[in-house]
Every structure is written in structure tokens, then in C-alpha cells.
Image: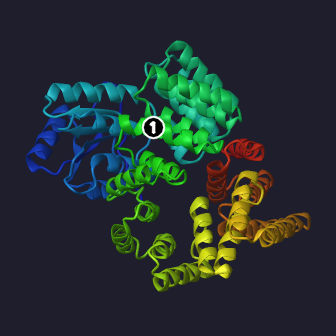
């Protein structure tokens, strides 16, 4: 449904004139009180929601200038999860004011909420004057951002950057807010030099944490890992409550294959802020694949609990929890966890696949070989249908090892082929792949499979390139897009698909649909290797097309 907007603002009017609001509160009396306060400020269009789910439905259909959202809704989706889902689905933009309202002032909640960046939070009880002052401050901070946001929504990123620069020339009071948007956009279009200059300008004026974090990310994306690490470590030292610094340090350690160090820094972060599902997932992953099953169990147990009503809930949280339990001898709870996973993800092919692969390992450990075989066969059927794309590499390699151990070489080789297809150009992953073949006594078969996949991928790329050379551009676009759909974890295929789309648009003009496809393709590559030079080059070219 098309969102309706009410963004009227004019000279001589109250700062609240023309504003719209959504009040998300399950207690009727508090909901009435908040609505009455807002009406007293002059806000006329006020919608209400009594749950997190209802709030998301409202945000999907209408634009709101202000969202006042309670944190706690009992066992249902909480305010933090409303915020994370709204941001994940792009339901709120730069100009929306999101304020979290809570009766809980504990450090763990505050850190969890601030991490997901509400604009402000209010601890009950608070007065009408306190709410007014907070809203007025945020409205002034976000004033004049609508034009920029419209350009962003239309994917005119370079135009949005120019609008930011035009507003900055007048030295506005919300200068840092505009500089933040500008730097975000520069990162988005791959102008890392420009982003670094913007971040440094902010830091020179005022060492704001968001600018220092951005500086570290820009250095990392440029391939300057050491400089990026120094920036993130400095932030952690100066601002121990900045949780993103812990996450980026851990990410660099993961990129370097230093999982023990990644686990340790994530454990530090969890002690400060245990309410982040993504950090619990990352710690669980690092702990599990370094053999620390007790820590993995704790983290995945937390991730399952935090994810109950979250858009970030994953079947892999359940499957890894079950495997962690099995490795510690808690077989009954492991099986029970997998049964819960089947109920939660019974209509999700990826979820069923990940549950089945975990069942194969768990039942094998329990010597219930018939059930293990049934689980492996179910996973095999899903793979053969081609109904899932990229699966976590570590989980896939572990599953392949289970298949080899069970004597199902056919399924093991099928899984390994998929992993090799997505990572045949990555030496570190290839070393992991060779280790599985070595442990299974199939070194020669592994070497042959790697070479076979390499030849296939070269031939696939050559077919697409030949279409381009022969002048069949639209056919080449369809060819590479189809290949990227089936090989979503393959960096080269995604880059080739993005490149052919960019080339076509440079000759025929920008196309909104193709621009969105390019953005999705490059996002996949960023998740694989944000420092890839070809990716950085295509990101800049895509940015040039976004007028």
C-alpha cells in the first residue's frame, strides 16, 4: 500500500504544526495520557497501536513524523524489536523521530536500545514539559531533512549529497545531523575518500562517536585494516559503552581468521550489553567453531530468547544451540530444541534444511543412525530442489563432514560442491575445504572437485561475456542475473551481474529497477568482501548513475 504523508510546515506556525504521531502503548490509560499530551502540543493526526505487531502494520502503510513506543509488551514483540524491524524494512527514515518509553532504567536495557539508535528515550513517569522539550529538540535536529530523504528514497544518492552540501553551506544548527547523512551516503556510493574527509571534519570540531566509527569503517573498506583496528580500539578505550566498536573489532578478527580473539572481544561486549541478538549470534558462532560449546550454548540460548519476536530470528540459532548441547552430552535437550525449531520454521526451506543438518549430527552422536539417515535424506531433497541459496560456510563444512562420517559420500560431495562454487577464489575457505577432505581420507577427490568447479565457473562466466561481445546485452543481463540468483554467495558472479547492469545503464540511462538490482548485488559482495577493489570500483560507478 502506498504510504500517505503529512509533512506540511510553514512560517509562523508552531513547531508541532503539521506533524503526525504514532503512539505504541499497551496500557490504555498511558496511551490516552500520551495522546492527550501530544494533542496539547498541537499535533492533530495521532494514531494508536496496542502492540509491536500493530505498530509495524501502521508503519508499513503511513508516514509518521514522531513515534512514541513503549519498550515492554509482556511476552510479545518489544519496543527495541519494533525499532530494529522498522529500520530493517526501511519503514522509518532520517526525518522520523523515534522515542522509546520505558519503566525500565537498567543499564542493559539502555545499552540495548541505544545500540539500535532510537533518537531518545524517556523513563516513566515523566511530565508533559519533559516530553515537549525532548520533542522540540529532536524536531529542530531533524528540520529540513525531508527533501534529502525524498532524494534518498528515489535512489538519487549523489543528488542527496549535493542537497546536504547546500544545507551545510548555511551553517545550520543541525549541522552534525546533516553531516552524518552526507557521510552515510558517501559510504553508500563508495566515495570512501569523501566519507573520510567528512568524518575527519566532524571529529576536528567535536569527537562524536558516530563519526569515529564511520572513519574506522571507511578505512576498513579501503583495505587499511590496521588503521581501522586502531580507530575501533581507540573508541572502545575512550567510550567503553560504544558497543559497535566491539563488533567491528570482532569482525576484523574474523576476517583475519583469529576466532579466539573475536570470541574474547565479543564476550567483553556481552558483559556490557547482553540485549543484542546479533552480538549473541556472533559470539555463539565464534565460540562454537573454537570448540567452546558452553559459551556457545549460553549465547545461542540468549539469541533464541531475544529472537522470539524479532525479524532477526534465525533457524541457525536453534540448530547451533542443539549442536552445542549435543557436544556437551545434553542429548535430550538437543532433540527437544530441534523439535521446537521444526515448529518455528516449518514453512521455511532454509530453516528446515538447517534443522535437518543439525539433526544429522545430533542423532549420529546419539548413535540413532536411522534417524540421522532420515535427516540427511531430507536435507538432500531440499538441496536437490534448489530451494535454498547460500548457507553458512562453517555449518556446511560441518554437515559435509557428518555425511562423510555416515558414509553418504554423494550428499557430502554435493554440499562441498556448493561451498566450493561460492568460494573457489578464497584461499582461506579452500584450506578449510581441503581439511574436510583430508580428515575423510579423500584428498584426491577433493582436489578433483575443486578443479572441476573452477572450470565450470570459468565456462559460465565466458558464456555471459560472449553474449556481451556479440551484442546481446539484454540476454547477457538475464543470464548473469539468473546465475547470481542461483549463486548468491559467489562474489565474481554477483560482481559480473552488477557490472553488466551498470554498463547497460551508462549507455541507455539509469533505470530504477536495475539500480535496485545493482544495489542488492553489491550488498551481497559487501557482506562477502567489502575491501574487494572491483566491488569498490563498481560501487562508485553505481553512485554516479544515481543522479
Q: Can residue 18 be seen in this view?
A: no
The C terminus sits in image quarter: top right
320 or 303: nearer the viewer: 320
Name the secondary structure under disc 1.
helix
238 or 260: nearer the viewer: 260
Give above or below for 202 relative to 182.
Answer: above
Return the x and y of residue 261 as percentages of the image width and height.
55, 38
Return the x and y of residue 138 as percentages of the image width and height.
34, 29
Residue at image coords 72%, 69%: 483
435 or 386: nearer the viewer: 435
The N terminus sits in image quarter: bottom left
Give above or below for 142 relative to 482.
Answer: above
Q: In this view, does 86 lie to the left or right of 167?
A: left
**Outermost top residue:** 205
151 or 106: nearer the viewer: 106
Q: In this view, does 490 lie to the left or right of 5?
A: right
Q: Is residue 373 left or right of residue 280?
A: right
Quarter occupied by residue 217: top right
**Outermost right residue:** 470
Return the x and y of residue 420 as percentages of the image width and height.
72, 65
Task: Determine which residue is flagged by label 1.
Answer: 146
Give above or below for 60 relative to 197.
Answer: below
Mark 1 closeness class: few <14, some 14–19, many ≥20 residues within 10 Å? some
Residue at image coords 40%, 28%: 241
Return the x and y of residue 40 as percentages of the image width and height.
15, 34
Q: Is residue 159 left or right of residue 134?
A: right
Q: Can residue 367 be seen in this view?
A: yes
Residue at image coords 27%, 27%: 134
Quarter occupied by residue 122: top left
Amino acid at each position: 500500500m502506498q504510504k500517505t504523508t503529512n509533512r506540511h510546515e510553514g512560517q509562523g506556525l508552531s513547531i508541532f504544526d503539521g506533524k503526525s504521531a504514532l503512539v505504541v502503548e499497551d496500557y490504555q490509560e498511558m496511551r490516552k495520557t500520551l495522546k492527550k499530551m501530544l494533542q496539547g502540543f498541537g499535533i492533530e493526526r495521532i494514531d494508536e497501536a496496542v502492540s509491536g505487531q500493530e505498530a509495524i502494520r501502521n508503519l508499513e502503510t503511513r508516514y509518521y513524523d514522531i513515534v512514541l513506543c513503549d519498550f515492554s509488551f509482556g511476552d510479545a514483540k518489544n519496543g527495541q524489536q519494533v525499532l530494529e524491524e522498522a529500520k530493517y524494512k526501511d519503514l522509518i527514515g532520517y526525518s522520523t523521530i523515534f522515542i522509546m518509553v520505558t519503566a525500565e532504567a537498567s543499564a542493559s536495557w539502555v545499552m540495548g536500545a541505544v545500540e539500535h539508535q532510537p533518537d531518545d528515550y524517556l523513563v516513566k513517569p515523566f511530565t508533559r514539559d519533559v516530553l515537549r522539550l525532548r520533542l522540540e529538540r529532536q524536531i529542530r535536529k531533524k528540520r529540513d531533512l525531508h527533501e534529502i530523504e525524498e532524494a534518498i528514497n528515489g535512489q538519487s544518492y549523489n543528488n542527496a549529497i549535493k542537497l546536504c552540501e547546500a544545507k551545510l553551506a548555511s551553517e545550520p544548527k543541525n549541522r552534525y545531523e546533516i553531516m552524518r547523512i552526507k557521510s552515510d551516503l558517501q559510504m553508500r556510493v563508495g566515495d570512501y575518500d569523501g566519507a573520510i574527509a567528512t568524518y575527519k571534519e566532524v571529529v576536528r570540531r567535536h569527537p562524536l562517536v558516530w563519526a569515529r566509527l564511520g572513519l574506522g569503517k571507511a578505512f576498513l573498506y579501503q583495505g587499511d585494516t590496521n588503521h581501522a583496528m586502531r580507530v575501533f580500539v581507540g573508541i572502545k578505550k575512550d567510550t567503553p559503552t560504544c558497543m559497535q566498536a566491539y563488533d567491528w573489532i570482532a569482525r576484523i578478527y574474523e576476517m583475519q581468521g583469529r576466532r579466539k580473539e573475536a570470541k574474547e572481544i565479543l564476550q567483553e561486549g556481552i558483559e556490557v550489553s547482553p540485549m543484542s541478538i546479533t552480538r549473541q549470534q556472533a559470539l555463539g558462532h565464534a565460540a562454537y567453531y573454537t570448540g567452546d560449546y558452553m559459551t556457545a550454548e549460553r549465547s545461542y540460548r540468549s539469541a533464541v530468547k531475544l529472537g522470539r519476536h524479532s525479524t532477526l530470528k534465525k533457524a541457525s540459532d536453534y540448530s547451533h544451540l542443539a549442536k552445542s548441547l549435543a557436544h556437551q552430552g545434553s542429548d535430550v535437550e538437543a532433540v527437544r530444541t530441534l523439535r521446537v525449531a521444526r515448529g518455528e520454521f516449518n514453512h521455511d526451506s532454509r530453516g528446515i534444511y538447517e534443522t535437518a543438518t543439525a539433526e544429522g549430527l545430533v542423532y549420529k552422536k546419539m548413535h540413532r543412525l536411522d534417524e540421522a539417515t532420515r535427516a540427511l535424506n531430507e536435507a538432500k531433497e531440499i538441496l536437490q530442489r534448489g530451494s535454498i541459496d547460500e548457507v553458512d560456510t562453517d555449518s556446511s563444512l560441518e554437515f559435509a563432514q557428518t555425511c562423510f562420517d555416515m558414509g553418504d559420500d554423494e550428499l557430502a560431495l554435493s554440499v562441498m560442491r556448493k561451498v566450493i562454487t561460492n568460494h573457489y577464489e578464497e584461499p582461506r575457505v579452500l584450506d578449510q575445504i581441503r581439511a574436510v577432505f583430508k580428515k575423510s581420507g579423500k584428498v584426491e577427490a577433493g582436489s578433483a572437485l575443486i578443479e572441476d568447479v573452477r572450470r565450470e565457473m570459468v565456462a559460465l562466466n565466458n558464456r555471459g561475456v560472449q553474449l556481451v561481445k556479440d551484442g546481446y546485452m539484454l540476454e547477457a543481463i538475464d543470464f548473469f542475473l539468473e546465475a547470481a540468483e542461483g549463486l548468491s554467495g559467489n562474489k565474481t558472479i554477483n560482481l559480473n551481474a552488477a557490472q553488466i547492469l551498470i554498463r547497460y545503464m551508462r549507455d541507455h540511462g539509469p533505470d530504477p529497477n536495475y539500480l535496485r538490482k545493482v544495489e542488492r548485488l553489491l550488498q551481497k559482495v559487501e557482506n562477502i568482501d567489502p575491501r574487494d577493489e572491483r566491488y569498490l570500483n563498481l560501487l562508485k560507478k553505481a553512485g554516479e548513475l544515481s543522479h
